[in-house]
Image (cartoon, grey):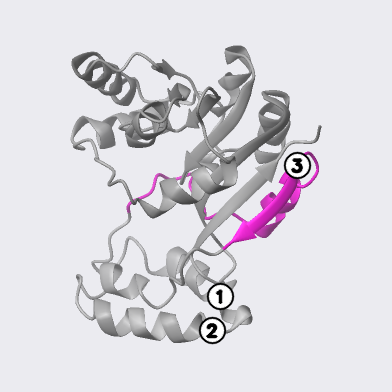
């Protein structure tokens, strides 16, 4: 397992962000709107964007009145976001090079946001305590995450991804968020889990079929989403936290 600030993951993400164009969120971006609903608004709040990447969510929250500390372990990602904020005159986003365990040095936060970040963090139990100690009483956190609930998807990841022409897009230490890790969060937070949409068979379009059969596989996932026993197996989940008062 990687340790905090291990150079290998840092170099991996430097390579990713060296060539990644910054994303631009639409006003109706579903993840951002779900986060706002959980937060109950961000105007005047101190927000942590954990694993900010190119900073599209940092900018989204800043334009709605938040003061955002945007954290990423990639110096290239942070430098790119800092330059874009200067160019666009955004003064309420403060990009910082740090890993998930370094947030304790940044003060306390009213709100925390992360997109596809929790499943990269180890040791996870120690991070839970760092996160809880970095939030204000009654603070809220929203994480858009993947999930390892489906044994079939985990089997495919372990035996097929990276072989047979199937792309591998993750670093060596990444693994989908496990149910026991969600339970670790319950030690320090009130936790609820939502499944924003069903994504199970649809993964085959991108990984196996090179973008073909999107519509057909989405239809299958829509049918599966009618049943709770299948919906909880979706590769996508939102993990919502409330810190105790």
Q: SS of the residue at dot 3? A: loop
Residue highlighted by disc 1: 231
**In the foreground, 100 or 169:** 100
Q: From where the camera sits, is residue 119 visible?
A: no
**In the foreground, 115 or 208:** 115
Q: Position of residue 112 (x, y in %)?
A: 56, 33
Residue at the (51%, 37%) spot, across then down: 113
Q: Is residue 43 left or right of residue 138?
A: left
Q: Residues within 10 Å of mark 3 (few under 14, many from 20)?
A: many
Asked if the residues shown at circle 3 and circle 1 are in contact, with their CB atoms under 8 angstroms apart, the answer is no
Which one is earlier in the sequence, the residue at label 3 or at label 1?
3
* Residue 167, magenta (yes or no): no
* Residue 171, magenta (yes or no): yes
Which one is earlier in the sequence, the residue at label 1 or at label 2?
2
**In the foreground, 14 or 159:** 14
Residue highlighted by disc 3: 189
Question: What span is colored magenta in the figure?
Answer: 169-194
Which one is earlier in the sequence, the residue at label 3 or at label 2?
3
Q: In this view, does 221 lie to the left or right of 14?
A: right
**123 w.r.t. 238: above or below:** above
Q: Position of residue 95 (x, y in %)?
A: 39, 18
Label 3 to label 1: alpha-carbon separation: 24 Å
Residue highlighted by disc 2: 226
Q: In this view, does 144 lie to the left or right of 149?
A: left
Q: Position of residue 47 (x, y in %)?
A: 52, 26
């Amino acid at each position: 397992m990687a340790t905090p600030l291990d150079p290998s993951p840092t170099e991996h993400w430097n390579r990713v962000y060296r060539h990644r164009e910054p994303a631009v969120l639409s006003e109706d971006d579903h993840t951002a709107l779900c986060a706002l609903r959980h937060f109950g608004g961000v105007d005047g709040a101190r927000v942590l964007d954990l694993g900010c990447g190119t900073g599209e969510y940092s900018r989204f929250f800043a334009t709605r009145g938040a003061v955002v500390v945007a954290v990423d372990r990639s110096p290239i990602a942070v430098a790119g976001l800092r330059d874009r904020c200067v160019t666009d005159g955004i003064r309420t986003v403060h990009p910082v090079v740090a890993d998930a365990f370094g947030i304790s040095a940044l003060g306390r936060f009213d709100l925390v946001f992360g997109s596809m970040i929790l499943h990269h963090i180890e040791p996870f139990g120690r991070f839970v305590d760092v996160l809880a100690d970095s939030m204000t009483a009654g603070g809220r956190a929203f994480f858009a995450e993947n999930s390892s609930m489906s044994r079939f998807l985990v089997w495919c990841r372990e035996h097929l991804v990276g072989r047979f022409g199937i792309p591998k897009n993750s670093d060596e230490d990444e693994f989908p968020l496990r149910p026991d890790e969600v339970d670790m969060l319950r030690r320090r937070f009130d936790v609820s889990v939502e499944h924003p949409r069903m994504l199970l068979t649809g993964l085959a379009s991108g990984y196996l079929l090179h973008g073909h059969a999107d519509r057909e596989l989405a239809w299958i996932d829509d049918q599966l989403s009618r049943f709770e026993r299948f919906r909880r197996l979706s590769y996508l989940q939102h993990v919502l936290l409330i810190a105790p008062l």
